[in-house]
Amino acid sequence: MTRPAPTPRHRAPSAASVLLALVLPALLLAGCNAAGGGLVSGAERPDGAPPGTCWGKTAIPARIETVTEHVLEAPAAYAPDGTLVRAAQYRTERRQDIVEERRETWFETPCPDDLTPDFIASLQRALKARGAYSGPVTGRMDAATRAALRSWQQARGGPDSDKLSLETARELGLVAVPRETPEEG
């Protein structure tokens, strides 16, 4: 009599592998700042940026226009009595012209350590109170929150980014506006 092959058993992940899965992304992101198109390393920032500040960067793509022209290759030929013997011949040329060069814009952001679940939940509530976000308040920077944030910032002349600018955070009451101190005389 033949016995059936044993069923493979799946082992639960070890505590070390779970810890590595949770800690490794944080270690990889340490020292990085939020940016419009991804992460900007702590060393990359605009010229003159104060140390300890975090920055995002958005790229505005070049505007390209396709130009189509009909170029005369052979003019029309006419008989002495004025009748058309041969129609004019044209060739079509297409080219792309850069109308506006690509630009990068920098904007100051809250630092990643400040973007806690409580902070994100406050951001979601602030956007919801202004009718810009209709999703649940989860404390996670999910796709719906990013889309609402991008739309809100863009509509107010801010960065075209799903990363929170410091200016937007101040406008929404999430970050304190720095106090102006009288100059000492």
Image (cartoon, rainbow, N blue to C red):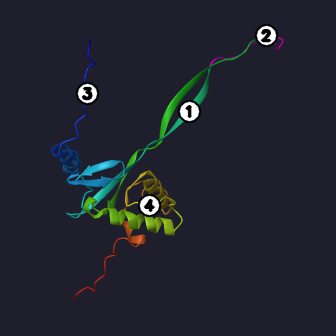
* Mark drawn on residue 158: 4
Q: Looking at the image, is mark 3 or mark 1 earlier in the sequence?
A: 3
Q: Position of residue 58 (x, y in %)?
A: 38, 51
Quarter holding residue 87 = top right
Q: Where does label 2 land, which residue?
A: 79
Which residue is farthest front? 1
Label 3 and label 1: CA atoms lie apart by 64 Å
The amino acid on which the numbered mark 3 sits, given as a three-letter code, is Pro
Kindly report which numbered mark, 2 or 3, lies closer to the viewer in this rendering: 3
Kindly report which numbered mark, 4 or 3, lies closer to the viewer in this rendering: 3
| Closest to the observer, 26 or 172 | 26
Kindly report which numbered mark, 3 or 1, lies closer to the viewer in this rendering: 3
Q: Where does label 3 land, which residue?
A: 8
The amino acid on which the numbered mark 2 sits, given as a three-letter code, is Ala
Q: Looking at the image, is mark 2 or mark 3 earlier in the sequence?
A: 3
The amino acid on which the numbered mark 1 sits, given as a three-letter code, is Val
| Closest to the observer, 128 or 171 | 128
Label 4 and label 3: CA atoms lie apart by 56 Å
Tell me: residue 167, above or below residue 161. Answer: below
Q: Secondary structure at mark 4?
A: loop
> Which segment is the magenta one?
73-83
**Location of the N terminus (image quadrant):** top left
Q: Position of residue 97 (x, y in %)?
A: 49, 36
Residue plotted at (49% across, 57% down): 151
